[in-house]
Structure formats: C-alpha cells, structure tokens
Image (cartoon, rainbow, N blue to C red):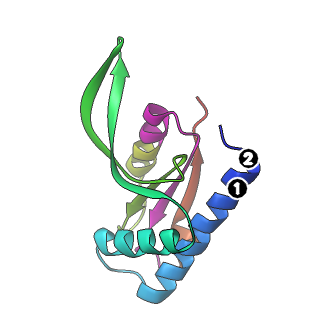
Amino acid sequence: MESSSNVERVAAIIVDAAVKVHIALGPGLLESVYQKCYVHERRKRGLSVETEVALPIHYDGESVESGLRIDMLVEGSIVVENKSVEKLHPLHEAQLLTYLRLSGRRIGFLLNWNSVLIKDGIKRMVNGY
C-alpha cells in the first residue's frame, strides 16, 4: 500500500492537472475530449495513467466479467471518473463507489468537466470498506 503522503501528492497533481485542462478547454465539450487532454497532462507530470481499465467482479471464488470500465487509474491507486454533464447525480457517485469497492482502491475522484468552475465539479470520494 502506498504511503498517505504519496497518495496526497498524487491527488494534488490530479486536481491541479484538471484545473489546467479546464482553463485551456472550458466547459461544454464531450467527455472524451477532456479525457484525452487530461491523460496527456498527467503523463507530462510524470504520473502513470491507465485508461478504460476492465473491472471484473470477484464473487464466490470466481472472476465474473462485468463489462465495467474504470475511466482512469492513476499510479495504480487512484480511480478517476470523468463526466461532462449538467450536474452530478447520486448515480455518478454510486458508480465511483462501485469502482472503488470492486477494485479495492481507497481514493477516487469524480470530475464534471461541464462545470463553469472546475473546482465545483471535482468530488473526492473515499472507499470506507
């Protein structure tokens, strides 16, 4: 398990990179546009980023294909879900919590790129299980 100081360092870079991308592009574009630029920005900052990571369900001693995909996994430890919607809904939070629990990751970010101010569209969530 990573040290909490390293996780916090990576979390700060995640937020800072989101701000930079949002300043450059503004709100209102498709999620895929932000995702491509955001991945580029984080890799430029030296972070490893995996995209569209398959997430199986481990149940009854077996791995069951779920069709679920994590938008981004940063440094192998932080889940990032991207949205470009009018406003975040509880369903989006449930999606991120599902990904955190099924992947065994503790920290995740839900980013709504369609927010006028990106700081209002960033939600950090913690897996309590």
Q: Residue at x 66, y 65 (%)?
A: 12
Q: Is residue 20 above or below residue 121?
A: below
Q: Amino acid at mark 1?
A: Glu
Left or right of residue 1: residue 36: left
Q: Secondary structure at mark 1?
A: helix
Please name the residue that numbered disc 2 is placed on.
4
Q: Residue at x 24, y 30 (%)?
A: 65
As drawn, the residue found furthest toward the right would be 5
Residue 17: horizontal and vertical position, in percent? Answer: 55, 73
Q: CA distance from mark 1 to mark 2?
A: 6 Å
Say the numbered circle drawn on residue 8.
1
Q: Secondary structure at mark 2?
A: helix
Residue stretch in magenta: 97-116
Residue 66: horizontal and vertical position, in percent? Answer: 26, 33
- Who is closer to the viewer here, 74 or 71? 74
Q: Amino acid at mark 2?
A: Ser
Looking at the rendering, in which quadrant would you find the C terminus? top right
